[in-house]
Image: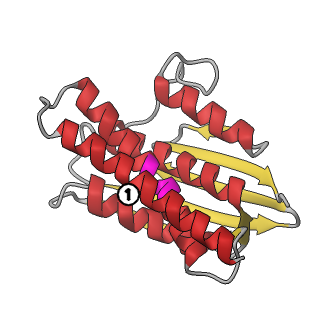
Amino acid sequence: DVLLKEIHHRIKNNLQLISSIIYIRMCSMDRNDVFHFLEETRQKIRSIALMHERLLQTESIHEVDARDYIVKLIDDMKATSFDRNSKIRIIEQIESHTLDLDTAINLGLILNELVTNAMKYAFADKESGTIEISLHKKDQVFEFRVADNGIGLPANILPGRSGTFGMQMLEIFTKQIHAEIVIHRNHGTAFHITFPQHG
């Protein structure tokens, strides 16, 4: 257990080092598409590093508490990605359940992708808005939902069928946890993701 804790500690530090190297390079770049891509990549790296950090702070070396991890990840995204004057609110309804290592990593990446996309596109013509994030468990199935009341996702944007980078990433992350995804497009956009309990 001590050895595994040390491994998690080293992984966390190495991921933070990679993030810092990317940041140093970004400081000399214009705010173009490459700059924003690198910033989104840094957020993905931070979400994985955070999971290893949570493992260091708990007795378990293989599992994390879903609420603890997701709420901390949301707080991290607010601190690093949200404009200080943003009028976009995030409402959380996260139940406390145990997630295994791989599920936690992929769920964090899914959350990062969906919230980042909502921040970039959902409120383009709106001064304010709301993003709702929830996680519930029924029997042995988790129900994860990220919804916004923005302008709505175009009908041609679908995981696995759309050529956008974000949708390609979303398809990869959901497949990793054997998840099914349904998109609702009424009064904004809602991603409803269900996946079985692992481990």
Which residue appears at 73% of the width and 68% of the height? Answer: 62
Boundaries of the magenta span = 45-49
Q: Work out whether residue 180 or residue 40 is closer to the camera in this orientation and state it.
A: 40
Q: Quadrant of residue 83?
A: bottom left
Decide: is 25 above or below 95: above
Label 1 sits on residue: 130
Please identify the dominant SS of the magenta region. Answer: helix
Number of marks in picture: 1
Q: Is residue 116 left or right of residue 157?
A: left
Task: Indicate the amino acid at tag 1.
Answer: Thr
Quadrant including the N terminus: bottom right
Q: Residues within 10 Å of mark 1 (few under 14, many from 20)?
A: some
Decide: is 34 above or below 42: above
Residue 116: give x, y in percent of width and height. Answer: 39, 44
Which residue appears at 57% of the width and 26% of the height? Answer: 168
Residue 47 in magenta stretch: yes
Q: Work out whether residue 154 or residue 15 is closer to the camera in this orientation and state it.
A: 15
Q: Is residue 34 left or right of residue 105?
A: left
